[in-house]
Amino acid sequence: MSAVNVAVIGAGRMAQVMSQVLLAGGGRVSVFSRRGMVRKALKEQLKKVHIVDSVEEACHHAHVVVLAVPAPDMPEAAASYAPFAQPDHIVIHACRGVAAGLVLPHQAIRNQTCVRKIVALGGPLYAEKLAKDRPMVAVAASRFADANERVRKLVEGTPVRLHGVSDVVGVEIAGAISNVSALAVGMSDALQLGDTARGVLLTRGLSEATRLGVRMGAELATFSGLAGVGDLIPRTVSSTKRHHDVGAQLSDGKTLAEALKSVTGSVEGVVTAQEVAAKTEKMGLRLPLVQGIAGILSGRLHVQQTLEDLLRLDLELEKESLAAGR
Amino acid sequence: MRQEDQERILTELQSRILHRITAQAAAKGPPLEEVLADSIYHELRRLKDEADGRAHREAGAFWAEARKALPRGNERAIQSLLARAIDRYSREIAGYFDERVYRTVTRAGEPVLAMLLGATSPKRLAANFPSMPQLSDNLVVQGETEHLRRLHEVGTVLLVPTHVSHMDSVITGYVVWKLGLPPFLYGAGLNLFSNPLLGYFMRNLGAYTVDRKKADPLYKEVLKEYATLTLENGYDNIFFPGGTRSRSGAVEKRLKYGLMGTGIPAYINNLKQKKNKSKVFIVPATLSYQLVLEAETLMDDFLKEVGKSRYIITDDEFSRPRRVFEFAQQVFSLDSKIFFTLGRGMDPFGNPVDDHGESLDPHGRHIDASRYVLVDGEPRELPQRDAEYTREVGERVMDAYARDNVVQATNITARAILTLLRKQNPGMDLVRLIRAGGRSEDMELLAVYREVETIMRQLRGMADRGGIRLSPTTQRGGADEIVAEGLRHFAIYHTTPAVSRRGDRVFPTDRSLLFYYQNRLEGYRLEREDALRPALSADHRALGRGAA
């Protein structure tokens, strides 16, 4: 078979790394970024990829399209791609968040385009590690087994090993809520609440992700797999994540705007916490961690008090709510 | 189906399935003798449980012979036995359609078609002819009628209606005729053919036979292939994707994708053969009744414990001509309307199509749907992929059902009364409340009016946003008019009225019927304001699963 044509839309860190991996897998990669300056910089960095001037040009003859944008921007990115989308395209994203109205990334893509074969990457997929060529394992979630297979083949011969699963909703929610947990852990670490607190917060985050996920149609097993638990373990080790930093700064008394300004790249967990909290309150679903973090982000709640409340909460709650949520 | 097409289709069907199972056997699938052994096992087991008869004896002889031949048959003999088995199945399914009969029936027009509703004997028909209920006065066909005609011109249509009653097939057939379209083929349960007159007309109005008692996988494959082939050959079809009549009365929330998925292989085969009219369209239709002929039997079945429900009901109201006739006469005497709402068509991948049958993306731009089925540039079937496409279609179909469901006065009256009953008996399990009744039963008429007003506020808002449809009374009438119409209907036809009124008080008399009629409003989250859990899912999720 001839080389696979890949279009990458967006030019953040994830887009760059994905371009490199797909290139290494033998794909012909075209990248489009909205900002002209970024396009120029990219042209110098990535010699072998085609940096193009429009979405249309990127998608011309494409087989696979990577929408490498943060989750809140997904509806807009999908809409700009929609006129050039084709029914046989495979669309990949690696979002870890949701868009306004608790719209999951694959839903945003589906709502805007004719594409059905959507692949969500999840699990411990960290751009930093990818860039360093270390072997790494991640999850590729798609309802379409042939799409998963195609993407798996695309990264053959690279350090990336993909496990195909079918639970798109579960993988997306696990990734989104883990960013909210990272915010909480960042706050807790800055307040020096200790490792136990961190463990409780991460467990609670996963449990809330599970409840929300199951309510939205995800499979329970996803959350104890690579995209759920598997994603939390490396994250607790590396404490350099943007979300962690933003959380820590909020604990130190900075405003959200100040904290966000100090990190480069998107902090999807902020929008995610707020959107999930707003929607689940309407649904009558109790997610104390997500709702608490949302309260802190909006300035309604005090950091230390909220975390202490969270740590005191009865853990039995998870069991009951899981039963009710199903 | 035209006779010349029939023979061609049956030959093609046999060769396709034989080819498929031989190819599967070669690719480490089940060997041919295993496929045959499976058929023999399922068929002999079915025949053991079934009543004796000519067809029964003949089938028994065939399968007994096959069993005898199996152990010492060479591959050729086994192949020939399989070919005969496929032929038996496909001939039973296809039956015989006589175009002359169809022309006679349709030329005679409404009285004869209306009689089909009654499914009565000619004698009874003659005796009652002057007062024969006229279906056309009581049936409102609305929605995308012109769109359906257009789609029929440019491709093949798969009409997928909601299903609560056996009357659905008759009414759907009538609507097709009324729109001036040639008859659509549809699968009808074998038991419905047992009424000789009805069976005769059904066959000749396009019905083919589905025997749900046949558990043989080969039979199911033949059935699916038959449906695929008819679509490929340009015969429009009707499938009820709910699989069976809704037991709870609720709009379908779970569909069976087997037959609905045949649109994709039919389309792919057409693409391979480069046919001009290659497209297949799925068109949802939603039927809404004030009263349902079989409500009592269906609800009774629903309320049985998990696992005990009868998937196939052979002895219900539809098989009793007198009940059907009473139903038609009484319901139509109240100027009761049956709504038949046609939705927009879609391609087999869940995209809407325009009047020319062109697939559209969410922004209304044309897309080339054939690219959904390409594998390395060629159209090809991929079972897992195609099942996903069909699931997507199913979701769009269910959206259409929810939007096009026409709320009638009986639904609202039943819901209001049942809600009050639940509020009057707090903490009481719904199943117990329905079976045994509550501590406090009757209620003030005025309280019912207030409850109806609350429901109507929500429903009218929802209808304005296009989320549901309302009948003329429920759209414009006051609470008193809606309740009056509801009570008028509940007073007739059913053995025990669901509810009766004495002075200014209302007495629920058949709570399970109230439950049945209110279930049409399930899934719209109306209970949010009452702080009650949804009636159907609160206590009946498990039951519903058993009756799915």
Image: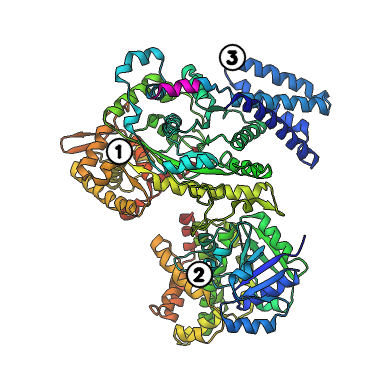
Over which residues does the magenta segment extend?
B101-109
Q: Is residue A191 visible?
A: no
Residue closest to the eye, A78 or B73: A78
Q: Residues within 10 Å of mark 3 (few under 14, many from 20)?
A: few
On screen, residue B95 versus residue B124, left or right, reads right
Three-letter amino acid code of the residue under disc 1: Thr
Q: Nearer the viewer, residue B252 or B91?
A: B91
- The quadrant in which the N terminus of chain B is found is top right
Q: Nearer the viewer, mark 3 or mark 2?
A: 2
Query: Residue under circle 2?
Result: A76
Disc 2 sits on a residue from what chain? A
Question: In front: B118, or A166?
Answer: B118
Check if residue B103 falls in the magenta segment.
Answer: yes
Circles 3 and 2 on the same chain: no
Rendered view: A229 above or below B522? below
Callout 1 secondary element: helix
Residues marked 3 and 2 touching at CB (< 8 Å): no
Apparent side of residue B117 relative to residue B425 in the rendered image (left or right)? right
Q: Which disc is residue B53 wearing?
A: 3
Q: Position of residue B449 (x, y in %)?
A: 21, 45
Q: Residue A179, located in which quarter of the rendered image?
A: bottom right
C-alpha separation, residue under disc 3 versus residue under disc 2: 66 Å
Q: Which residue is mark 1?
A: B410
Alpha-carbon neighbours of circle 2 within 10 Å: few (<14), some, or many (≥20)?
Answer: some
